[in-house]
């Protein structure tokens, strides 16, 4: 299984990029990365890259703030 992940397109992508995009970090935090190979590669990159790990935390806070705002409501639409 590990050998297949190492050779997957997603693994090669995340290991070859300098940093993961905000879009992919948001997808990760929202649980939208469902492909096992992509998920493993993304997690390995975040663990190995302090900058992406920090950005992943920032993205998580941003997404959680947006969720809270939607749930809380109280938007003045007029």
Image (cartoon, helix red, strand yellow):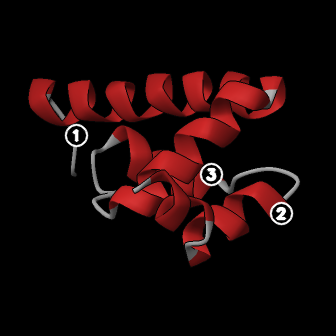
Could you tell me which secondary element the residue under label 2 belongs to? Answer: helix
66 left or right, relative to 56: left
Label 1 close to label 2 by CB (< 8 Å): no
Mark 3 or mark 1, whichever is nearer to me: 3
**Residue at numbered disc 2:** 16
| Residue 9 percent coordinates (x, y) | 59, 77
- Assess disc 1: are there few (<14), some (14-19) or many (≥20) residues with their C-alpha within 10 Å of its C-alpha: few
Residue 12 is situated, as x and y percent measured from the top left of the image, at 70, 68
Q: Position of residue 61 (x, y in %)?
A: 47, 22
Distance of label 3 from label 1 (alpha carbons): 29 Å
Q: Tell me the quadrant of the picture where the N terminus can be found.
A: bottom left
Residue 62 vertical placement versus 2 (above, below): above
Query: Looking at the picture, does residue 34 appear above or below residue 76?
Result: below
Tell which circle, 1 or 2, labels the residue nearer the N-terminal end: 2
Query: Is disc 3 placed on a helix, strand or loop?
Result: helix
- Residue at the outermost right position: 18
Calculate the distance from the C-alpha at mark 2 to the C-alpha at mark 3. Answer: 16 Å
- Earlier sequence position, callout 3 versus callout 1: 3
The CA distance from mark 1 to mark 2 is 45 Å
Considering the numbered disc 1 on the image, is that residue within a helix, a strand or a loop?
A: loop
Q: Look at mark 1 in the image and give the residue it sits on.
A: 76
Residue under circle 3? 22
């Amino acid at each position: 299984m590990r050998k297949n992940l190492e050779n997957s397109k997603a693994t090669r992508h995340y290991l070859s990029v300098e940093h993961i995009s905000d879009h992919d970090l948001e997808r990760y935090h929202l649980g939208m990365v469902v492909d096992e190979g992509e998920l493993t590669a993304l997690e390995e990159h975040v663990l190995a890259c302090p900058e992406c790990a920090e950005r992943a935390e920032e993205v998580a806070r941003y997404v959680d703030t947006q969720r809270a705002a939607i749930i809380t409501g109280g938007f003045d639409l007029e």
